Protein backbone atom coordinates (compact mmCIF):
# COMPACT_ATOMS: atom_id res chain seq x y z
CA UNK A 1 0.00 0.00 0.00
CA UNK A 2 2.82 2.32 0.96
CA UNK A 3 4.64 1.43 -2.26
CA UNK A 4 1.53 2.22 -4.29
CA UNK A 5 1.22 5.59 -2.63
CA UNK A 6 4.87 6.33 -3.37
CA UNK A 7 4.38 5.37 -7.01
CA UNK A 8 1.33 7.56 -7.28
CA UNK A 9 3.04 10.52 -5.64
CA UNK A 10 6.07 10.20 -7.90
CA UNK A 11 3.81 10.11 -10.99
CA UNK A 12 1.97 13.22 -9.90
CA UNK A 13 5.27 14.90 -9.06
CA UNK A 14 6.68 14.07 -12.49
CA UNK A 15 3.66 15.49 -14.29
CA UNK A 16 3.67 18.51 -12.03
CA UNK A 17 7.34 19.25 -12.65
CA UNK A 18 6.88 18.79 -16.39
CA UNK A 19 4.01 21.28 -16.52
CA UNK A 20 5.76 23.67 -14.17
CA UNK A 21 9.00 23.69 -16.17
CA UNK A 22 6.98 24.22 -19.33
CA UNK A 23 5.14 27.11 -17.67
CA UNK A 24 8.39 28.49 -16.30
CA UNK A 25 10.32 28.59 -19.56
CA UNK A 26 7.43 30.06 -21.51
CA UNK A 27 5.26 32.40 -19.45
CA UNK A 28 7.62 33.44 -16.68
CA UNK A 29 11.15 33.38 -18.10
CA UNK A 30 10.14 33.73 -21.73
CA UNK A 31 13.05 31.63 -23.03
CA UNK A 32 10.88 30.32 -25.86
CA UNK A 33 8.87 32.86 -27.82
CA UNK A 34 5.17 32.15 -28.06
CA UNK A 35 5.28 31.28 -31.73
CA UNK A 36 7.75 28.44 -31.01
CA UNK A 37 6.31 27.03 -27.81
CA UNK A 38 3.23 28.55 -26.21
CA UNK A 39 2.65 28.07 -22.51
CA UNK A 40 0.25 25.40 -21.20
CA UNK A 41 -2.19 28.05 -20.01
CA UNK A 42 -2.24 29.66 -23.45
CA UNK A 43 -2.98 26.29 -25.08
CA UNK A 44 -5.77 25.63 -22.62
CA UNK A 45 -7.42 28.98 -23.28
CA UNK A 46 -7.05 28.50 -27.04
CA UNK A 47 -8.66 25.08 -26.73
CA UNK A 48 -11.57 26.49 -24.72
CA UNK A 49 -12.04 29.47 -27.02
CA UNK A 50 -12.04 27.24 -30.08
CA UNK A 51 -15.30 25.64 -28.98
CA UNK A 52 -17.13 28.92 -29.56
CA UNK A 53 -14.88 30.79 -31.97
CA UNK A 54 -14.82 30.23 -35.71
CA UNK A 55 -11.68 32.23 -36.50
CA UNK A 56 -9.23 31.68 -38.08
CA UNK A 57 -10.23 28.52 -39.96
CA UNK A 58 -13.99 28.95 -40.27
CA UNK A 59 -15.29 26.31 -37.92
CA UNK A 60 -15.75 25.72 -34.22
CA UNK A 61 -14.05 22.77 -32.59
CA UNK A 62 -17.30 20.81 -32.39
CA UNK A 63 -17.94 21.30 -36.12
CA UNK A 64 -14.45 19.99 -36.91
CA UNK A 65 -14.88 17.03 -34.57
CA UNK A 66 -18.25 16.19 -36.08
CA UNK A 67 -16.89 16.39 -39.65
CA UNK A 68 -13.99 14.06 -38.83
CA UNK A 69 -16.04 11.68 -36.75
CA UNK A 70 -18.75 11.32 -39.38
CA UNK A 71 -16.22 10.45 -42.08
CA UNK A 72 -14.31 8.05 -39.84
CA UNK A 73 -17.53 6.25 -38.91
CA UNK A 74 -18.72 5.90 -42.52
CA UNK A 75 -15.45 4.43 -43.73
CA UNK A 76 -14.93 2.31 -40.66
CA UNK A 77 -18.42 0.81 -40.61
CA UNK A 78 -18.31 -0.01 -44.31
CA UNK A 79 -14.83 -1.52 -43.98
CA UNK A 80 -15.85 -3.68 -41.02
CA UNK A 81 -19.13 -4.84 -42.57
CA UNK A 82 -17.35 -5.94 -45.74
CA UNK A 83 -13.95 -6.93 -44.33
CA UNK A 84 -14.99 -9.31 -41.57
CA UNK A 85 -17.24 -11.57 -43.73
CA UNK A 86 -14.64 -11.64 -46.51
CA UNK A 87 -11.96 -12.69 -44.03
CA UNK A 88 -14.19 -15.40 -42.62
CA UNK A 89 -15.09 -16.74 -46.06
CA UNK A 90 -11.43 -16.71 -47.08
CA UNK A 91 -10.41 -18.70 -44.04
CA UNK A 92 -13.27 -21.19 -44.18
CA UNK A 93 -13.66 -22.06 -47.85
CA UNK A 94 -10.62 -23.49 -49.57
CA UNK A 95 -11.39 -22.13 -53.04
CA UNK A 96 -11.92 -18.62 -51.73
CA UNK A 97 -8.70 -18.83 -49.76
CA UNK A 98 -6.65 -19.86 -52.78
CA UNK A 99 -8.28 -17.24 -54.98
CA UNK A 100 -8.38 -14.16 -52.74
CA UNK A 101 -5.25 -14.58 -50.62
CA UNK A 102 -2.71 -13.88 -53.40
CA UNK A 103 -4.59 -10.73 -54.43
CA UNK A 104 -4.94 -9.67 -50.82
CA UNK A 105 -1.22 -10.14 -50.19
CA UNK A 106 -0.57 -8.03 -53.28
CA UNK A 107 -2.70 -5.12 -52.04
CA UNK A 108 -1.90 -5.32 -48.33
CA UNK A 109 1.67 -3.95 -48.23
CA UNK A 110 0.50 -0.63 -49.69
CA UNK A 111 -0.05 1.64 -46.68
CA UNK A 112 -3.49 3.30 -46.50
CA UNK A 113 -1.87 6.74 -46.77
CA UNK A 114 -0.61 5.85 -50.24
CA UNK A 115 -4.22 5.42 -51.40
CA UNK A 116 -5.05 9.05 -50.74
CA UNK A 117 -3.85 10.49 -54.10
CA UNK A 118 -5.55 7.74 -56.12
CA UNK A 119 -8.84 8.19 -54.29
CA UNK A 120 -8.63 11.96 -54.71
CA UNK A 121 -8.26 11.51 -58.47
CA UNK A 122 -11.15 9.04 -58.63
CA UNK A 123 -13.63 10.78 -56.38
CA UNK A 124 -12.45 14.38 -56.39
CA UNK A 125 -11.69 16.46 -53.33
CA UNK A 126 -14.68 15.60 -51.22
CA UNK A 127 -16.04 13.39 -48.49
CA UNK A 128 -16.22 10.29 -50.70
CA UNK A 129 -12.47 10.16 -51.36
CA UNK A 130 -11.63 10.35 -47.67
CA UNK A 131 -14.27 7.78 -46.72
CA UNK A 132 -12.83 5.50 -49.43
CA UNK A 133 -9.31 5.81 -48.00
CA UNK A 134 -10.57 4.94 -44.52
CA UNK A 135 -12.53 2.06 -46.00
CA UNK A 136 -9.35 0.65 -47.56
CA UNK A 137 -7.38 0.97 -44.33
CA UNK A 138 -10.13 -0.68 -42.28
CA UNK A 139 -10.99 -3.43 -44.71
CA UNK A 140 -7.43 -4.80 -44.98
CA UNK A 141 -6.96 -5.00 -41.21
CA UNK A 142 -10.39 -6.57 -40.68
CA UNK A 143 -9.83 -9.18 -43.39
CA UNK A 144 -6.44 -10.06 -41.98
CA UNK A 145 -7.60 -10.47 -38.39
CA UNK A 146 -10.78 -12.38 -39.06
CA UNK A 147 -8.83 -14.64 -41.42
CA UNK A 148 -6.18 -15.37 -38.79
CA UNK A 149 -8.86 -15.77 -36.11
CA UNK A 150 -10.81 -18.39 -38.06
CA UNK A 151 -7.61 -20.21 -39.04
CA UNK A 152 -6.75 -20.56 -35.36
CA UNK A 153 -9.88 -22.57 -34.57
CA UNK A 154 -8.75 -25.50 -32.44
CA UNK A 155 -8.91 -28.82 -34.27
CA UNK A 156 -10.23 -30.55 -31.15
CA UNK A 157 -13.23 -28.22 -31.09
CA UNK A 158 -13.97 -28.95 -34.74
CA UNK A 159 -13.69 -32.68 -34.16
CA UNK A 160 -16.06 -32.52 -31.20
CA UNK A 161 -18.60 -30.64 -33.32
CA UNK A 162 -18.19 -33.11 -36.18
CA UNK A 163 -18.62 -36.05 -33.83
CA UNK A 164 -21.88 -34.58 -32.60
CA UNK A 165 -23.07 -34.36 -36.18
CA UNK A 166 -22.71 -30.65 -36.88
CA UNK A 167 -22.65 -29.62 -40.52
CA UNK A 168 -19.87 -27.52 -41.97
CA UNK A 169 -21.98 -24.35 -41.74
CA UNK A 170 -22.98 -25.14 -38.17
CA UNK A 171 -19.33 -25.58 -37.18
CA UNK A 172 -18.55 -22.24 -38.76
CA UNK A 173 -21.25 -20.36 -36.88
CA UNK A 174 -21.18 -22.23 -33.57
CA UNK A 175 -17.49 -22.97 -33.20
CA UNK A 176 -15.18 -21.09 -35.52
CA UNK A 177 -16.70 -17.60 -35.42
CA UNK A 178 -17.20 -17.44 -31.64
CA UNK A 179 -13.64 -18.59 -31.06
CA UNK A 180 -12.37 -16.04 -33.57
CA UNK A 181 -14.23 -13.12 -32.00
CA UNK A 182 -11.42 -11.88 -29.73
CA UNK A 183 -9.09 -11.80 -32.74
CA UNK A 184 -11.71 -10.00 -34.83
CA UNK A 185 -12.12 -7.37 -32.14
CA UNK A 186 -8.37 -6.88 -31.97
CA UNK A 187 -8.55 -6.23 -35.70
CA UNK A 188 -11.36 -3.74 -35.21
CA UNK A 189 -9.48 -1.75 -32.61
CA UNK A 190 -6.28 -1.81 -34.68
CA UNK A 191 -8.16 -0.57 -37.72
CA UNK A 192 -9.94 2.06 -35.65
CA UNK A 193 -6.57 3.53 -34.68
CA UNK A 194 -5.34 3.27 -38.24
CA UNK A 195 -8.52 4.82 -39.63
CA UNK A 196 -8.36 7.75 -37.27
CA UNK A 197 -4.72 8.44 -38.14
CA UNK A 198 -5.31 8.04 -41.87
CA UNK A 199 -8.23 10.42 -41.69
CA UNK A 200 -6.11 13.09 -40.04
CA UNK A 201 -3.54 12.72 -42.81
CA UNK A 202 -6.20 12.84 -45.53
CA UNK A 203 -7.72 15.96 -44.04
CA UNK A 204 -4.32 17.60 -43.97
CA UNK A 205 -3.96 17.03 -47.70
CA UNK A 206 -7.42 17.96 -48.90
CA UNK A 207 -10.31 19.20 -46.81
CA UNK A 208 -12.13 22.30 -45.69
CA UNK A 209 -13.35 20.88 -42.39
CA UNK A 210 -12.15 18.41 -39.83
CA UNK A 211 -9.47 18.13 -37.18
CA UNK A 212 -6.70 17.33 -39.65
CA UNK A 213 -7.63 20.43 -41.63
CA UNK A 214 -7.64 22.46 -38.43
CA UNK A 215 -4.07 21.60 -37.46
CA UNK A 216 -2.83 21.99 -41.02
CA UNK A 217 -4.47 25.42 -41.30
CA UNK A 218 -3.10 26.44 -37.91
CA UNK A 219 0.33 25.35 -39.13
CA UNK A 220 0.07 27.65 -42.14
CA UNK A 221 -0.96 30.50 -39.83
CA UNK A 222 2.03 29.58 -37.61
CA UNK A 223 -0.33 29.20 -34.63
CA UNK A 224 1.48 26.59 -32.54
CA UNK A 225 -1.06 26.89 -29.73
CA UNK A 226 -3.88 25.98 -32.09
CA UNK A 227 -1.86 23.09 -33.56
CA UNK A 228 -1.31 21.63 -30.10
CA UNK A 229 -4.94 22.23 -29.11
CA UNK A 230 -5.98 20.32 -32.25
CA UNK A 231 -3.56 17.50 -31.46
CA UNK A 232 -5.02 17.23 -27.96
CA UNK A 233 -8.52 16.96 -29.41
CA UNK A 234 -7.41 14.33 -31.97
CA UNK A 235 -5.81 12.29 -29.21
CA UNK A 236 -8.83 12.54 -26.90
CA UNK A 237 -11.32 11.53 -29.60
CA UNK A 238 -9.08 8.62 -30.61
CA UNK A 239 -8.94 7.45 -27.00
CA UNK A 240 -12.74 7.74 -26.66
CA UNK A 241 -13.31 5.71 -29.83
CA UNK A 242 -11.01 3.02 -28.46
CA UNK A 243 -12.77 2.97 -25.10
CA UNK A 244 -16.17 2.58 -26.78
CA UNK A 245 -14.87 -0.32 -28.85
CA UNK A 246 -13.44 -2.05 -25.77
CA UNK A 247 -16.80 -1.62 -24.04
CA UNK A 248 -18.59 -3.28 -26.97
CA UNK A 249 -16.02 -6.06 -27.01
CA UNK A 250 -16.56 -6.81 -23.33
CA UNK A 251 -20.29 -7.15 -23.80
CA UNK A 252 -20.12 -9.17 -27.05
CA UNK A 253 -17.20 -11.53 -26.44
CA UNK A 254 -18.23 -13.82 -23.62
CA UNK A 255 -15.89 -16.14 -21.84
CA UNK A 256 -12.78 -14.30 -22.85
CA UNK A 257 -11.87 -13.57 -19.28
CA UNK A 258 -12.54 -17.07 -18.06
CA UNK A 259 -9.39 -18.40 -19.64
CA UNK B 1 1.01 -6.17 -33.25
CA UNK B 2 2.80 -8.98 -35.02
CA UNK B 3 1.22 -11.97 -36.61
CA UNK B 4 1.65 -15.32 -34.96
CA UNK B 5 4.64 -17.12 -36.39
CA UNK B 6 2.97 -20.39 -37.19
CA UNK B 7 -0.61 -20.56 -38.24
CA UNK B 8 -2.77 -23.56 -38.03
CA UNK B 9 -3.39 -24.13 -41.69
CA UNK B 10 -6.50 -26.17 -42.10
CA UNK B 11 -5.82 -26.99 -45.72
CA UNK B 12 -2.80 -29.07 -46.59
CA UNK B 13 -3.43 -28.25 -50.27
CA UNK B 14 -1.00 -29.32 -52.95
CA UNK B 15 1.51 -26.75 -54.08
CA UNK B 16 0.59 -26.85 -57.75
CA UNK B 17 -3.03 -26.06 -56.95
CA UNK B 18 -2.01 -23.06 -54.90
CA UNK B 19 0.08 -21.72 -57.77
CA UNK B 20 -2.59 -22.38 -60.40
CA UNK B 21 -5.22 -20.59 -58.34
CA UNK B 22 -2.89 -17.65 -57.67
CA UNK B 23 -2.13 -17.26 -61.36
CA UNK B 24 -5.84 -17.53 -62.15
CA UNK B 25 -6.66 -14.89 -59.53
CA UNK B 26 -4.12 -12.44 -60.90
CA UNK B 27 -5.27 -13.11 -64.45
CA UNK B 28 -8.85 -12.31 -63.43
CA UNK B 29 -7.72 -9.21 -61.56
CA UNK B 30 -5.80 -7.81 -64.53
CA UNK B 31 -8.54 -8.75 -66.99
CA UNK B 32 -11.17 -6.90 -64.98
CA UNK B 33 -8.83 -3.93 -64.65
CA UNK B 34 -8.18 -3.97 -68.39
CA UNK B 35 -11.86 -4.23 -69.28
CA UNK B 36 -12.83 -1.44 -66.91
CA UNK B 37 -10.17 0.86 -68.36
CA UNK B 38 -11.52 0.19 -71.86
CA UNK B 39 -14.63 2.15 -70.96
CA UNK B 40 -14.07 5.59 -72.42
CA UNK B 41 -15.23 7.66 -69.49
CA UNK B 42 -13.26 5.68 -66.91
CA UNK B 43 -10.29 5.11 -69.20
CA UNK B 44 -9.59 8.83 -69.33
CA UNK B 45 -8.26 8.85 -65.80
CA UNK B 46 -7.75 5.15 -65.21
CA UNK B 47 -5.02 3.62 -67.39
CA UNK B 48 -4.92 -0.08 -68.21
CA UNK B 49 -2.46 -2.36 -66.38
CA UNK B 50 -0.06 -2.62 -69.32
CA UNK B 51 0.50 1.13 -69.43
CA UNK B 52 1.03 1.20 -65.68
CA UNK B 53 3.57 -1.62 -65.66
CA UNK B 54 5.34 -0.08 -68.64
CA UNK B 55 5.67 3.29 -66.94
CA UNK B 56 6.70 1.62 -63.69
CA UNK B 57 9.68 -0.05 -65.35
CA UNK B 58 10.30 2.99 -67.52
CA UNK B 59 10.71 5.06 -64.37
CA UNK B 60 13.86 3.14 -63.46
CA UNK B 61 15.53 4.56 -66.57
CA UNK B 62 13.89 7.90 -67.32
CA UNK B 63 13.50 10.20 -64.34
CA UNK B 64 10.19 11.32 -62.80
CA UNK B 65 10.76 14.95 -61.91
CA UNK B 66 14.43 15.23 -60.97
CA UNK B 67 15.20 11.63 -60.12
CA UNK B 68 14.74 8.08 -61.36
CA UNK B 69 12.65 5.63 -59.40
CA UNK B 70 15.65 4.08 -57.64
CA UNK B 71 16.83 7.49 -56.48
CA UNK B 72 13.36 8.32 -55.17
CA UNK B 73 13.30 5.04 -53.28
CA UNK B 74 16.77 5.75 -51.93
CA UNK B 75 15.70 9.18 -50.63
CA UNK B 76 12.68 7.72 -48.87
CA UNK B 77 14.66 4.82 -47.43
CA UNK B 78 17.34 7.15 -46.11
CA UNK B 79 14.73 9.25 -44.35
CA UNK B 80 12.90 6.31 -42.87
CA UNK B 81 16.10 4.58 -41.70
CA UNK B 82 17.47 7.69 -40.00
CA UNK B 83 14.23 8.45 -38.18
CA UNK B 84 13.62 4.81 -37.34
CA UNK B 85 17.10 4.28 -35.86
CA UNK B 86 16.67 7.47 -33.85
CA UNK B 87 13.37 6.10 -32.52
CA UNK B 88 14.97 2.75 -31.69
CA UNK B 89 17.91 4.37 -29.90
CA UNK B 90 15.55 6.34 -27.68
CA UNK B 91 12.72 3.79 -27.45
CA UNK B 92 14.62 0.62 -26.46
CA UNK B 93 16.51 2.16 -23.51
CA UNK B 94 13.36 4.00 -22.43
CA UNK B 95 11.34 0.79 -22.40
CA UNK B 96 14.05 -1.13 -20.53
CA UNK B 97 14.52 1.60 -17.93
CA UNK B 98 10.78 1.91 -17.29
CA UNK B 99 10.47 -1.86 -16.86
CA UNK B 100 13.45 -2.29 -14.53
CA UNK B 101 13.24 0.61 -12.13
CA UNK B 102 10.03 1.34 -10.26
CA UNK B 103 11.09 4.88 -9.45
CA UNK B 104 11.92 5.74 -13.03
CA UNK B 105 8.70 4.10 -14.19
CA UNK B 106 6.74 6.31 -11.81
CA UNK B 107 8.56 9.35 -13.16
CA UNK B 108 8.55 8.57 -16.89
CA UNK B 109 5.32 6.61 -17.40
CA UNK B 110 2.96 9.61 -16.98
CA UNK B 111 4.92 11.62 -19.53
CA UNK B 112 5.08 8.70 -21.94
CA UNK B 113 1.34 8.13 -21.52
CA UNK B 114 0.72 11.64 -22.79
CA UNK B 115 2.74 11.08 -25.97
CA UNK B 116 1.62 7.50 -26.58
CA UNK B 117 -1.98 7.96 -27.78
CA UNK B 118 -1.14 10.81 -30.19
CA UNK B 119 -1.54 9.39 -33.71
CA UNK B 120 1.87 9.54 -35.39
CA UNK B 121 0.79 11.63 -38.35
CA UNK B 122 -0.78 14.29 -36.13
CA UNK B 123 2.80 15.39 -35.39
CA UNK B 124 3.27 16.64 -38.95
CA UNK B 125 2.21 20.29 -38.47
CA UNK B 126 4.14 20.62 -35.23
CA UNK B 127 7.21 18.98 -36.79
CA UNK B 128 7.12 21.50 -39.63
CA UNK B 129 6.66 24.46 -37.29
CA UNK B 130 9.49 23.38 -35.01
CA UNK B 131 11.99 21.99 -37.50
CA UNK B 132 11.10 23.75 -40.75
CA UNK B 133 10.36 22.12 -44.06
CA UNK B 134 13.71 20.37 -44.42
CA UNK B 135 14.91 16.90 -43.57
CA UNK B 136 15.02 17.27 -39.79
CA UNK B 137 11.25 17.69 -39.50
CA UNK B 138 10.82 14.39 -41.37
CA UNK B 139 13.31 12.66 -39.06
CA UNK B 140 11.42 14.00 -36.06
CA UNK B 141 8.08 12.80 -37.40
CA UNK B 142 9.37 9.32 -38.24
CA UNK B 143 11.15 9.08 -34.91
CA UNK B 144 7.96 9.95 -33.01
CA UNK B 145 5.95 7.41 -35.01
CA UNK B 146 8.45 4.60 -34.46
CA UNK B 147 9.32 5.47 -30.86
CA UNK B 148 5.95 4.67 -29.30
CA UNK B 149 5.61 1.12 -30.63
CA UNK B 150 9.22 0.23 -29.89
CA UNK B 151 9.02 1.54 -26.33
CA UNK B 152 5.76 -0.26 -25.57
CA UNK B 153 7.00 -3.61 -26.86
CA UNK B 154 10.39 -3.34 -25.13
CA UNK B 155 8.66 -2.43 -21.88
CA UNK B 156 6.34 -5.42 -22.05
CA UNK B 157 9.18 -7.72 -23.02
CA UNK B 158 11.37 -6.66 -20.11
CA UNK B 159 8.43 -6.79 -17.71
CA UNK B 160 7.33 -10.29 -18.73
CA UNK B 161 10.59 -12.05 -17.99
CA UNK B 162 9.96 -15.51 -16.57
CA UNK B 163 10.32 -15.09 -12.75
CA UNK B 164 11.87 -18.54 -12.69
CA UNK B 165 14.79 -17.26 -14.79
CA UNK B 166 15.29 -14.28 -12.50
CA UNK B 167 15.19 -16.51 -9.45
CA UNK B 168 17.70 -18.93 -10.99
CA UNK B 169 20.09 -16.13 -11.91
CA UNK B 170 19.79 -14.63 -8.41
CA UNK B 171 20.44 -18.00 -6.82
CA UNK B 172 23.56 -18.42 -8.90
CA UNK B 173 24.80 -15.13 -7.53
CA UNK B 174 24.10 -12.66 -10.33
CA UNK B 175 24.12 -9.04 -9.29
CA UNK B 176 21.66 -6.49 -10.61
CA UNK B 177 23.81 -5.55 -13.57
CA UNK B 178 24.41 -9.16 -14.60
CA UNK B 179 20.72 -9.89 -14.18
CA UNK B 180 19.93 -6.98 -16.48
CA UNK B 181 22.42 -7.81 -19.26
CA UNK B 182 22.19 -11.60 -19.17
CA UNK B 183 18.57 -12.29 -18.36
CA UNK B 184 16.28 -9.34 -18.86
CA UNK B 185 17.65 -7.98 -22.14
CA UNK B 186 17.87 -11.44 -23.62
CA UNK B 187 14.32 -12.38 -22.81
CA UNK B 188 13.13 -9.02 -24.09
CA UNK B 189 14.78 -9.37 -27.49
CA UNK B 190 11.89 -11.20 -29.22
CA UNK B 191 9.51 -8.48 -28.01
CA UNK B 192 11.91 -5.78 -29.14
CA UNK B 193 12.00 -7.29 -32.59
CA UNK B 194 8.20 -7.50 -32.69
CA UNK B 195 8.19 -3.82 -31.79
CA UNK B 196 10.73 -2.96 -34.45
CA UNK B 197 8.78 -4.82 -37.13
CA UNK B 198 5.46 -3.31 -36.15
CA UNK B 199 6.88 0.19 -35.95
CA UNK B 200 8.68 0.01 -39.24
CA UNK B 201 5.38 -0.26 -41.08
CA UNK B 202 4.22 2.85 -39.23
CA UNK B 203 7.46 4.66 -40.01
CA UNK B 204 7.11 3.79 -43.68
CA UNK B 205 3.61 5.27 -43.60
CA UNK B 206 4.96 8.39 -41.92
CA UNK B 207 7.67 9.01 -44.48
CA UNK B 208 5.13 8.81 -47.29
CA UNK B 209 2.81 11.21 -45.52
CA UNK B 210 5.68 13.60 -44.81
CA UNK B 211 6.77 13.52 -48.44
CA UNK B 212 3.23 14.18 -49.62
CA UNK B 213 2.92 17.22 -47.38
CA UNK B 214 6.19 18.78 -48.44
CA UNK B 215 9.23 17.51 -50.36
CA UNK B 216 10.83 17.46 -53.78
CA UNK B 217 11.74 13.80 -54.01
CA UNK B 218 10.87 10.38 -52.61
CA UNK B 219 8.14 7.85 -53.31
CA UNK B 220 5.55 9.91 -51.45
CA UNK B 221 6.37 12.82 -53.73
CA UNK B 222 5.82 10.59 -56.79
CA UNK B 223 2.23 9.83 -55.90
CA UNK B 224 1.47 13.32 -54.69
CA UNK B 225 2.96 14.89 -57.80
CA UNK B 226 1.02 12.42 -59.93
CA UNK B 227 -2.17 13.49 -58.19
CA UNK B 228 -1.51 17.17 -58.78
CA UNK B 229 -1.20 16.55 -62.52
CA UNK B 230 -4.03 14.01 -62.50
CA UNK B 231 -1.50 11.48 -63.80
CA UNK B 232 -3.03 8.24 -62.53
CA UNK B 233 -0.33 6.14 -64.19
CA UNK B 234 2.36 7.81 -62.11
CA UNK B 235 0.25 7.46 -58.95
CA UNK B 236 -0.27 3.73 -59.41
CA UNK B 237 3.38 3.17 -60.37
CA UNK B 238 4.37 4.98 -57.17
CA UNK B 239 1.97 2.89 -55.10
CA UNK B 240 3.50 -0.23 -56.62
CA UNK B 241 6.97 0.94 -55.61
CA UNK B 242 5.77 1.79 -52.09
CA UNK B 243 4.22 -1.66 -51.68
CA UNK B 244 7.25 -3.49 -53.00
CA UNK B 245 9.74 -1.59 -50.85
CA UNK B 246 7.49 -2.13 -47.80
CA UNK B 247 7.43 -5.86 -48.52
CA UNK B 248 11.20 -6.10 -48.97
CA UNK B 249 12.01 -4.15 -45.82
CA UNK B 250 9.66 -6.21 -43.68
CA UNK B 251 11.16 -9.41 -45.13
CA UNK B 252 14.64 -8.09 -44.26
CA UNK B 253 13.56 -7.35 -40.69
CA UNK B 254 12.17 -10.87 -40.38
CA UNK B 255 15.44 -12.32 -41.67
CA UNK B 256 17.31 -10.21 -39.13
CA UNK B 257 15.09 -11.56 -36.37
CA UNK B 258 15.69 -15.10 -37.53
CA UNK B 259 19.45 -14.72 -37.29
CA UNK B 260 19.39 -12.73 -34.02
CA UNK B 261 17.07 -14.83 -31.95
CA UNK B 262 17.14 -18.34 -33.28
CA UNK B 263 16.06 -19.83 -29.97
CA UNK B 264 12.77 -18.00 -30.11
CA UNK B 265 11.86 -19.28 -33.57
CA UNK B 266 12.82 -22.83 -32.68
CA UNK B 267 10.90 -22.64 -29.43
CA UNK B 268 7.64 -21.80 -31.12
Image: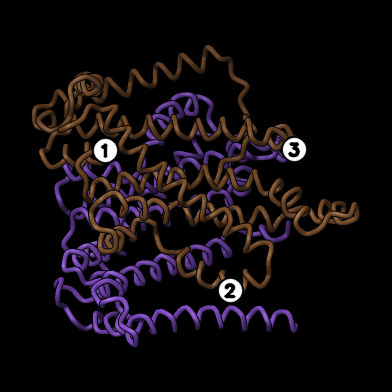
Chain colours: A purple, B brown
Against B40, residue B99 (above or below) is below
| Secondary structure state at the residue bearing disc 3 | helix
Q: Which circle's residue, 1 or 2, is located before the other in the chain?
A: 2
The x, y position of residue A44, in whole percent, is: 33, 82
User: Would residue B185 be found to the left or right of residue B233 on screen?
Assistant: right
Residue B107 - label: 2
Q: CA distance from mark 3 to mark 1?
A: 51 Å
Q: CA distance from mark 3 to mark 2?
A: 48 Å
| Secondary structure state at the residue bearing disc 2 | helix
Residue drawn 43% across and 81% down?
A21
Residue highlighted by disc 1? B218
Q: Residues within 10 Å of mark 1 (few under 14, many from 20)?
A: many
**Which chain is indicated by disc 1?**
B
Q: Looking at the picture, tell me which residue is in the foreground, A214 or B165.
A: B165
Residue A156 - label: 3
User: Would residue B12 be found to the left or right of residue B86 on screen?
Assistant: right
Residue drawn 14% across and 77% down?
A55
Q: Residues within 10 Å of mark 3 (few under 14, many from 20)?
A: few
**Which chain is indicated by disc 2?**
B
Quadrant in the picture for residue B235: top left
Amino acid sequence: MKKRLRYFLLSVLSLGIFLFVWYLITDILGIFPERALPSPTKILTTLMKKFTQRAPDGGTMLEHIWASLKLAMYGFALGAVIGIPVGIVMAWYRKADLFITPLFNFIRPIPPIAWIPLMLIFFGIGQTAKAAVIFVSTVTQCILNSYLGIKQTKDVHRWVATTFGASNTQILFKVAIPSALPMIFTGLSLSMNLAWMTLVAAEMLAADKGLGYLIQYARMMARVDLVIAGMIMITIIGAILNAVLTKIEHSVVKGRHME
Amino acid sequence: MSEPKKRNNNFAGSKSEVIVMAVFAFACFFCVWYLVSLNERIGKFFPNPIVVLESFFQAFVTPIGQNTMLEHIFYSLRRVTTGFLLGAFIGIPLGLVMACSKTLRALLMPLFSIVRPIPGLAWIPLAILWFGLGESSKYFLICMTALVGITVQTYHGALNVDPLHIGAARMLGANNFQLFTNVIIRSAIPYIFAGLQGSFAGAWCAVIAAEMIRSDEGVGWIIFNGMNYANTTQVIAGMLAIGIVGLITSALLRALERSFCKWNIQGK
